Image (cartoon, helix red, strand yellow):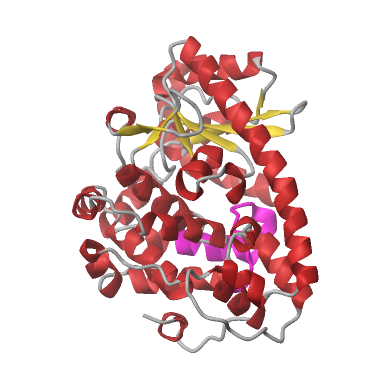
Amino acid sequence: MNQTNLHSGTELPAELRAMLAALREEDGNPPLPDIDWNQFLKRVRHHRVYPQLQDRPRAARLIPADVRQAIDRECGVNALRMLRLSGETIRLCRELESRGVRSLVLKGPALARHLYGDVSRRTSKDLDLLIPVSELEKAGQALRELGYVAERDIPKGLGDWKWKIHHIAFRNPKLGIEAEIHWRLNGDGGREPSFEELWAGRQISDLAAGLAMPGDSYLFLYLITHGARHGWFRLRWLMDIDKLARRELDWLGVAALLKRYRAVHLAGQALVLSSALLGTPVPEPLRPAVSGGRGQELARRALRFIRDDVVLTTDPSAGEVVKTYKSYLFALKTRPQKGLHALRRLYPSFRDAETLPLPRQLYFLYFPLRPFVWLWRQVRQIT
């Protein structure tokens, strides 16, 4: 598979092509490209891949010295930040453990250490911890006592919030660190492993003794669903797929896991992109996902986000980007998921209870009031 087949004649910007050439794990001595190096640096920062570029021998041959110096400065700042995040990850996990709350570390410094061997070789803006949903109140209290402030209260009343959203962000204003507490891997209500299944298949992180993270098969499932949900608009996420795909995993077992949780098409999307852009070898059991199914079409849709340096969001103020993103998210769903999505739109949401609080004995009124409350929320978002 090559880039031409992937993007169907839509040319990638020269600066993006140069960045991809520098990131690929290949030998050779390609010529120095004639590009706008300021635009190149802008793309490197957008895609958060400066640590990987610093680590690539090809990059030293492709990138002028003054540009490499700018990348080195970014890497120095990132190294300090990742060390701070590492210490805070350990502190939070230890605090939760002391209160009897099990946690699995998702992404962040633990993933950097696991995939790249060094926490400074990957960027991360926050910490992500997965816990059982039954322990959410206890975990929230622990973070508040450590100086964190929740971006929102834990939803009350209607219980659909447990699958419509999947995390709550907590920010420590003194440390300038954000921690996301997850109770699901994804917030679309799709099938995914329970916490107990993930805990049973956990591995111990090299970041610190006793810190747990999902086993590699579950990690691959999480990374492809996370990247797909965000449209792969940062190449950093594809770099993670590239590193994991080069490992000697039980790929037959991974293929079975993907089928069980209806994520084969998402694996196809990730590997189509990664193999075309980064030269990632596709594990034999996953090649059918790349050559057939919906993976290639979904990859083409995501490539537009990568090409145009789009930051995807559902914030109504973002205008046309929101419509494009929502259309893309709907395309990710399987046919049964699309049907379930339509049915759930008719069912009262926890957001209805937040918009129009009612006593529990009057919750039945949310069914007839659903269209009006939904319309009122849309008006409030627009205005």
Q: In this view, does 358 lie above or below 107?
A: above
Q: Which residue is drawn at the image coordinates 31% and 41% (left, top)?
A: 192
Q: Tell me, yes or no, whether the highlighted magenta stretch contains residue 313.
A: yes
Residue 201 falls left or right of residue 361: left
Q: Give the camera-side residue of 191 and 350.
A: 191
Relative image position of residue 43 (x, y in whole percent): 68, 68
Q: Is residue 122 visible?
A: no
**Extent of the magenta region:** 307-329
Q: In this view, does 356 lie above or below 224?
A: above
Q: Which residue is drawn at the image coordinates 26% and 48% (left, top)?
A: 261
Q: Residue 163: which quarter of the image?
A: top left
Residue 336 falls left or right of residue 76: left
Relative image position of residue 28 (x, y in whole percent): 52, 80
Q: Tell me, yes or no, whether the highlighted magenta stretch contains residue 300.
A: no
Relative image position of residue 80 (x, y in whole percent): 71, 40
Task: Please name the predominant secondary structure of the magenta segment in the image.
Answer: helix
Relative image position of residue 86 (x, y in whole percent): 60, 33
Q: Is residue 261 above or below residue 362?
A: below
Q: Can residue 131 be seen in this view?
A: yes
Q: Residue 347: which quarter of the image?
A: top left
Q: Give the camera-side residue of 59 and 367.
A: 59
**On-image quarter of the N terminus:** bottom left
